[in-house]
C-alpha cells in the first residue's frame, strides 16, 4: 500500500464520527445564514446516518446569528433620535441565548425535511469537571445514536462563566474546536472532522498561489514551519485553534481531518478514503513522508535525459535496450513476487476477474517481454534517418529527417506489461517518458520501473523515465503543455475522455473501440464463423474485439445463421439486436449501436448491402478496426477503400489490430486520430521530423541570383 493509501486506510473501520462546523461555514460573509451549505451538510449527515454511521454534530454560529437578529429588532424598534446616539454593542450572552434558539430551530427544520430527528445538548466548561456529568453525557449520546437521532452539541455561551481570554491553563475547552476534540475523546469517536472555510492546512496563506495543501500533518516536520493567518472572521478560533485541537485529539488516538465545509460532499469523501483536506494521525511520523510530485521538475528532467540519450551513438542506445532485456530476465522472481502481491490485493479488494487477468504476469511473460525488447533493439535505428533529400539550389541540400517528439506522458491501467513495452519504445525512439499506472498494479509497476531505470547508464540518467505514483500528480502534469509533447492514455473510455477534456497537450488515443464485422452474402460461412468467434471470444474486453456484427439481409433466415447463433449462446455470449434483428431473431433490442460491451456480448443488425454496412459503420463506429467477410472482390474493394477507420480488414479477425502482430515490436497505444499517428502506435508514431539544410554560404537576399532547382536526390544509405 502506498503512503497515501495507508494514511487513509483507517476510515474503513470508522463507525462513530464527530463533525464540527464553524461559524465561517454556518454564515455567509455578510453574517446571514448560509442556508445552502447547511442544507448540504444535513443531507450528508442524513446519508451517513442511513448507512449506519453514528454522527455527532458540534456546531458554532449561535452568537453571530443572535447578534444579527437582535440588531435587526433594535433597528426596527428605534426612533430616529435613538439612532443618533452612540450605539452600544449588544450583550454577547443575550446574543448566544437568542441565536441558540434560532440555530436549533433551523437544524430541526432541515432535518425534519430529510426525515431525520435531531437533539440539542448544551454544555459548559465546568460541566466536564463533574465525573457524573461526563457519564450521563455518554449515556445520553449512546441512547440517541442507538435511536438514529443526531445529537447536536454547542457550548452554552448564554450561561458560561468563562471570560476572555478564553484559552488559559485552567480551561478544559475554550472554543468549539477544542470542545469537539474533548468530545471525541469522551465519546470514544473513531474520527473527528473539522469543517473550515478553506480546503485544509496550507504551507502558507491559502490565498497565496505558492502555498501547498498539506495532506498529512507531521508534528515533527510541520510544527514551526506553518505560519497561521488571522483568526476566524466571525468565530472565536480560526486555523490556529483547529490545528491545536486536531493535534491534541490525534495524539490521544483520535484521527482528525480538517477540510472545507463549503464543498457539498467532503465528509462522505473523507469516509471514502479520498485524499482531501489535512489528516492528523498519531502514526503520521512513522509513515515515510509523502513526496509531493513536482510535475515540472520531473518533466524537465525527462527532457534533459532524452537529449543525452539522443546524443549517444546508435549502438549505445541499442545496448541500453539489450541491458534492460537481460535485467528483466535476471529479476523474474522478484517481479513475480511483487506481481503476486498486487493480484492478492486486487482479489481481496473484490476487483473483477477480467481486471485481475490483465494484471497477471503469467509464467513466461517476463521472458516474452524481454524478447520483445530485444526485437526493438535489433530494429533499424529510427532516430536521424533521412526520409527525403532535395537539392534546393546548386550546393544547397535539404534533408527531411526523423526526430524524437520530446517528452511523452503515458497514463495506463491494469497491465504492468504495458510499462515495459512503453519504456522500451520510448528509449528506442529517443523520447523522455513519464508513466502513470493504475493503483491495482502499483507494486508490479514500481519494481519494473526500478529494474529498467537501473539499467540505464548514468550518462543518460534514470530520470529519463519518471513514474508518477499518485493520482494527484496527473492534473499538474496535464497543465505542462510547454514541457510535455504528447499524452497517450491507455485504458477505459472514461479515462481517455477525461484526459482529452482536461489538457492542451496533444492526446493520442481512442475513447471507444466499437469494432464491426460485416458478413456479406458472398461470404463463406465457415470463414465468417471462425472470424466472429475469434473477434469476440479471444479477449472480449480488448479494444479490438468485435462489438457489432452486421449481416447482409439475404442471410436472414438461413440455417448457417441459426447455427452461428446457437454456437455463440453455447459459448455464453449474450446477443442484442438492432431494430431489424431484434424482432426477426427474437433477441433483446440494444439500447444503442454506439456501445462498447467489453464482455461476452455484442449487437447484431441486418443491412441491405455493403454500402449500407459502410454507412452504419461511419454513423455508429469509433473508427478503430472494421472487417468484411466476403468473396466478391468488387464488394471487398468498395469496403476496403471507403471505410474510414484506422484499420480495415478483409477475411481476418479484428484482433489482429495490435502492434506486436503488425510487426512494430511493441505498441504504446492505439490511435483513432487522423493527425500524426493512426492505428497501433509503435516507434514510428513517437517520431516527428526535422529539416536539415546544408549549404556553403548561400543567402536569400530577396531571392536575387538564387536559381532554385528543387531536384530530388537519392537517399544515402
Image (cartoon, rainbow, N blue to C red):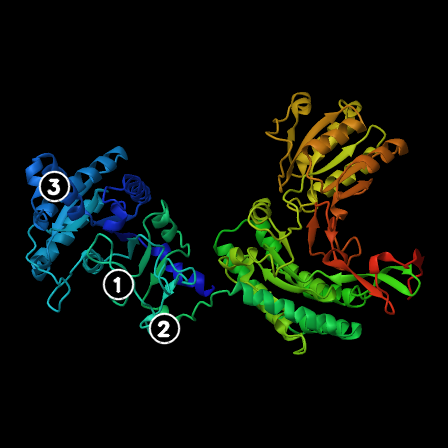
Mark 1 and mark 2: Cα distance apart in space = 17 Å
The answer to whether residue 332 is seen in the rendering is no
Check disc 3: other Cα within 10 Å, few if <14, some if 14-19, many if 20+: some
Tell me which residue sits at (75%, 23%) in the image: 556
Mark 3 and mark 1: Cα distance apart in space = 30 Å
Q: Quadrant of residue 681?
A: bottom right
Q: Give the residue pinned by disc 2.
A: 221
Quarter containing the C terminus? bottom right
CB-based contact (under 8 Å), mark 3 and mark 2 = no
Q: Nearer the viewer, residue 244 or 235?
A: 235
Q: Which mark is residue 665?
A: none
Residue 207 in the figure: left or right of residue 634: left
Total label count?
3
In terms of secondary structure, where does tag 3 sit?
helix
Residue 332 in the figure: left or right of residue 99: right
Depicted 100 relative to depicted 339: above or below: above
In terms of secondary structure, where does tag 2 sit?
helix
Q: Quadrant of residue 240?
A: bottom left
Q: Which mark is residue 240?
A: 1
Q: Quadrant of residue 133?
A: bottom left
Mark 3 and mark 2: Cα distance apart in space = 46 Å
Check disc 2: other Cα within 10 Å, few if <14, some if 14-19, many if 20+: few
- Depth check, mark 1 against mark 2: the one in front is 1
Q: Nearer the viewer, residue 583 or 709?
A: 709
- Residue 165 pos. (x, y %): 13, 63
Q: Nearer the viewer, residue 532 or 478?
A: 478
Q: Give the residue pinned by disc 3.
A: 70
- Residue 132 pos. (x, y %): 7, 57
The mark that comes first in sequence, 3 or 2, is 3
Residue 585 in the figure: left or right of residue 609: left
The mark that comes first in sequence, 1 or 2, is 2
The mark that comes first in sequence, 3 or 1, is 3
Amino acid at each position: 500500500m502506498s503512503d497515501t493509501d495507508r494514511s487513509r486506510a483507517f476510515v474503513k473501520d470508522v463507525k462513530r464520527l464527530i463533525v464540527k462546523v464553524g461559524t465561517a461555514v454556518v454564515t455567509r460573509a455578510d453574517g446571514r445564514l448560509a442556508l445552502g451549505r447547511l442544507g448540504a451538510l444535513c443531507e450528508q449527515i442524513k446519508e451517513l446516518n442511513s448507512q449506519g454511521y453514528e454522527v455527532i454534530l458540534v456546531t458554532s454560529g449561535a452568537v453571530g446569528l443572535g447578534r444579527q437578529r437582535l440588531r435587526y429588532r433594535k433597528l426596527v424598534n428605534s426612533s430616529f433620535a435613538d439612532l443618533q446616539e452612540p450605539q452600544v454593542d449588544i450583550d454577547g450572552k443575550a446574543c448566544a441565548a437568542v441565536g441558540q434558539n434560532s440555530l436549533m430551530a433551523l437544524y430541526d427544520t432541515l432535518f425534519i425535511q430529510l426525515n431525520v430527528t435531531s437533539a440539542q445538548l448544551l454544555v459548559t466548561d465546568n460541566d466536564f469537571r463533574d465525573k457524573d456529568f461526563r457519564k450521563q453525557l455518554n449515556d445520553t449520546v449512546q441512547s440517541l445514536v442507538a435511536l438514529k437521532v443526531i445529537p447536536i452539541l454547542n457550548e452554552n455561551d448564554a450561561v458560561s462563566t468563562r471570560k476572555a481570554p478564553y484559552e488559559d491553563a485552567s480551561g478544559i475547552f475554550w472554543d468549539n474546536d477544542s470542545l469537539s476534540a474533548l468530545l471525541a475523546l469522551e465519546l470514544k469517536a473513531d474520527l473527528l472532522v473539522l469543517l473550515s472555510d478553506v480546503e485544509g492546512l496550507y504551507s502558507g496563506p491559502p490565498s497565496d498561489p505558492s502555498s501547498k495543501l498539506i495532506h498529512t500533518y507531521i508534528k515533527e516536520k510541520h510544527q514551526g514551519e506553518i505560519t497561521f493567518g488571522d483568526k476566524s472572521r466571525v468565530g472565536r478560533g480560526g486555523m490556529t485553534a483547529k490545528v491545536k485541537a486536531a493535534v491534541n485529539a490525534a495524539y490521544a488516538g483520535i484521527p482528525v481531518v480538517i477540510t472545507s465545509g463549503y464543498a457539498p460532499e467532503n465528509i462522505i469523501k473523507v469516509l471514502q478514503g479520498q485524499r482531501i483536506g489535512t489528516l492528523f494521525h498519531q502514526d503520521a511520523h512513522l509513515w515515510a513522508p509523502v513526496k509531493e510530485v513536482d510535475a515540472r521538475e520531473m518533466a524537465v528532467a525527462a527532457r534533459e535525459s532524452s537529449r543525452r540519450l539522443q546524443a549517444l551513438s546508435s549502438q549505445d542506445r541499442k545496448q541500453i535496450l539489450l541491458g534492460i532485456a537481460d535485467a528483466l530476465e535476471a529479476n523474474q522472481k522478484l517481479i513475480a513476487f511483487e506481481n503476486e502481491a498486487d493480484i492478492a490485493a486486487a482479489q481481496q479488494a473484490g476487483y473483477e476477474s477480467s481486471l485481475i487477468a490483465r494484471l497477471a504476469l503469467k509464467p513466461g511473460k517476463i521472458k516474452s517481454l524481454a524478447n520483445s525488447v530485444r526485437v526493438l533493439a535489433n530494429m533499424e535505428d529510427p532516430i536521424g534517418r533521412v526520409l527525403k533529400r532535395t537539392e534546393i539550389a546548386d550546393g544547397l541540400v535539404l534533408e527531411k529527417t526523423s526526430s524524437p517528439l520530446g517528452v511523452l506522458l503515458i497514463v495506463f491501467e491494469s497491465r504492468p506489461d504495458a510499462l515495459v513495452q512503453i519504456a522500451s519504445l520510448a528509449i528506442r525512439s529517443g523520447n523522455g517518458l513519464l508513466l502513470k499506472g493504475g493503483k491495482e498494479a502499483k507494486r508490479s509497476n514500481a519494481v519494473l520501473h526500478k529494474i529498467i531505470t537501473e539499467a540505464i547508464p548514468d550518462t543518460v540518467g534514470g530520470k529519463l523515465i519518471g513514474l508518477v505514483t499518485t493520482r494527484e500528480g496527473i492534473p499538474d502534469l496535464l497543465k505542462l503543455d510547454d514541457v510535455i509533447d504528447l499524452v497517450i492514455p491507455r485504458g477505459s473510455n472514461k479515462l481517455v475522455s477525461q484526459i482529452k477534456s482536461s489538457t492542451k497537450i496533444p492526446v493520442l488515443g481512442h475513447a471507444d473501440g466499437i469494432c464491426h464485422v460485416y458478413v456479406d452474402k458472398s461470404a463463406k460461412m465457415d470463414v465468417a464463423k471462425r472470424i466472429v468467434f475469434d473477434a469476440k471470444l479471444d479477449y472480449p474486453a480488448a479494444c479490438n474485439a468485435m462489438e457489432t456484427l452486421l449481416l447482409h439481409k439475404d442471410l436472414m433466415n438461413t440455417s448457417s445463421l441459426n447455427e452461428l447463433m446457437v454456437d455463440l449462446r453455447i459459448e455464453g455470449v449474450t446477443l442484442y439486436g438492432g431494430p431489424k434483428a431484434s424482432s426477426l431473431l427474437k433477441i433483446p433490442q440494444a439500447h444503442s449501436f454506439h456501445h462498447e460491451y467489453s464482455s461476452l456480448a455484442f449487437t447484431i443488425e441486418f443491412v441491405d448491402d455493403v454500402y449500407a454496412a459502410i454507412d452504419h459503420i461511419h454513423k455508429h463506429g469509433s473508427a478503430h478496426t472494421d472487417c468484411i467477410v466476403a468473396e466478391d472482390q468488387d464488394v471487398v474493394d468498395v469496403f476496403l477503400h471507403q471505410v474510414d477507420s484506422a484499420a480495415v480488414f478483409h477475411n481476418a479477425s479484428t484482433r489482429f489490430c495490435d502492434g506486436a502482430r503488425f510487426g512494430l515490436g511493441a505498441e504504446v497505444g492505439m490511435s483513432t486520430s487522423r493527425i500524426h499517428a493512426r492505428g497501433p502506435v509503435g516507434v514510428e508514431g513517437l517520431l516527428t521530423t526535422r529539416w536539415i539544410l546544408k549549404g556553403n554560404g548561400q543567402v536569400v537576399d530577396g531571392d536575387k541570383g538564387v536559381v532554385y532547382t528543387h531536384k530530388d536526390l537519392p537517399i544515402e544509405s
